[in-house]
Image (cartoon, grey):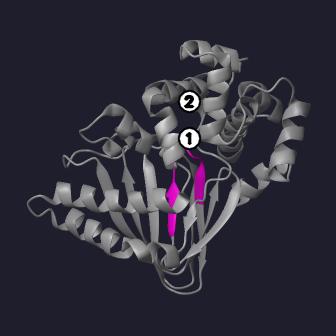
């Protein structure tokens, strides 16, 4: 089903560095739209001047000068702006594997996981006042300068600066606290497998028992672990994944609503419409009209 709509390729690695940075500049009184799409990479948008609107998984987010938008891996997003004044932002995309460093695997993956799973309560916009405590502006400017200059060692300099930005994001979010980290670090690979399995099989009739068995965990331990990490029970998280996929198809194709429902694992189109309206406040048809009109 994923071949029927636009999934952007991963960052180009021709330069030997799996990062991509660029300055996006928009002239005064010029409208622009980056249509709904997704990719496996993490993407950061840091605003230097102007005002922007992002739709992530159907939710509207406004961000402006000094703010940072964080787009997780496989997160549906579209960017809009009506630029009455000159505006610009720095875009940075990089492969998820670049968060992996030498060290114990559990310590590595606990930093990767928060950028793999898209949870309803995760903050997406990081405000200027919070970012200033971590010198995020300086880090992103230096990363762009190093990327463009290609001076000796620029690959390390880019990565070092972006990692500092991600540390700021994780600390401001405060989602992956020490309690969760210590409690589940020895099963982090199994946790990762669970999310990967859900992402690949959400359209099927999967249950928490299925996933717990694949992770070689007891039902009760898996349930406690899953709720501790996602703050959702299994059925709530599975619904969020199915709705995320449905939003993307609605925004980027003309596939009939019934086909979208069944293709995303819903038992009927009426149940799909009901859950979509309950979670998003509008019907799938209204969402499609809004996104495609934009």
The answer to whether mark 2 and mark 1 are in CB contact below 8 A is: yes
Q: Secondary structure at mark 2?
A: helix
Q: Is residue 113 magenta?
A: no
Residue 16 on image: x %, y %: 19, 46
The image quadrant that residue 208 belongs to is top right
* Residue picked out by circle 1: 117
Please indicate whether residue 183 sits to the left or right of residue 155 in the image: right
Classed neighbour count for the residue bearing mark 2: other residues with Cα under 10 Å, few (<14), some (14–19), many (≥20): some
55 or 162, which lies in front? 162
* Residue picked out by circle 2: 195
The image quadrant that residue 236 belongs to is top right
Please indicate whether residue 14 sits to the left or right of residue 65 in the image: left
Looking at this rendering, what residue extends furthest in the left direction?
152
Q: Is residue 216 above or below residue 75?
A: above
Residue 276 in view of the camera = yes
User: Which residues make up the magenta segment?
Assistant: 68-78
Residue at x 47%, y 44% (from the top left corner): 8
């Amino acid at each position: 089903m994923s071949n029927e709509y636009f999934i952007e390729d991963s960052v180009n690695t021709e330069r030997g560095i799996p990062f991509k940075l660029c300055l996006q500049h928009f002239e005064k009184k010029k409208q622009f739209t980056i249509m709904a799409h997704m990719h496996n990479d993490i993407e950061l948008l840091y605003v230097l001047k102007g005002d922007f609107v992002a739709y992530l998984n159907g939710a509207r987010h406004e961000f402006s000068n000094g703010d940072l938008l964080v787009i997780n891996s496989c997160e549906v997003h579209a960017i809009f702006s009506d630029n009455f004044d000159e505006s610009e932002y720095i875009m940075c995309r990089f492969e998820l594997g670049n968060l992996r460093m030498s060290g114990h695997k559990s310590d590595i993956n606990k930093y990767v996981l928060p950028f793999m799973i898209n949870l309803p309560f995760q903050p997406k916009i990081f405000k200027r006042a919070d970012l200033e405590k971590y010198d995020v502006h300086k880090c992103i400017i230096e990363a762009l300068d190093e990327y463009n200059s290609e001076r000796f060692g620029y690959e390390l300099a880019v990565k070092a600066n972006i990692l500092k930005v991600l540390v700021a994001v994780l600390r401001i979010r405060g989602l992956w606290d020490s309690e969760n980290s210590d409690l589940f670090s020895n099963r982090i690979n199994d946790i990762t497998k669970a999310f990967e399995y859900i992402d690949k099989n959400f359209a099927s009739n999967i249950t928490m028992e299925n996933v717990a068995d694949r992770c070689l965990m007891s039902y009760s331990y898996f349930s406690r672990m899953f709720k501790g990490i996602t703050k959702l029970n299994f059925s709530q998280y599975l619904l969020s994944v199915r709705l995320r996929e449905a939003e993307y198809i609605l925004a980027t194709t003309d596939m009939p609503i019934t086909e979208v429902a069944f293709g995303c694992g819903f038992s009927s189109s009426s149940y799909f419409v009901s859950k979509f309206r309950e979670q998003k406040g509008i019907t799938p048809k209204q969402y499609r009209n809004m996104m495609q009109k934009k």
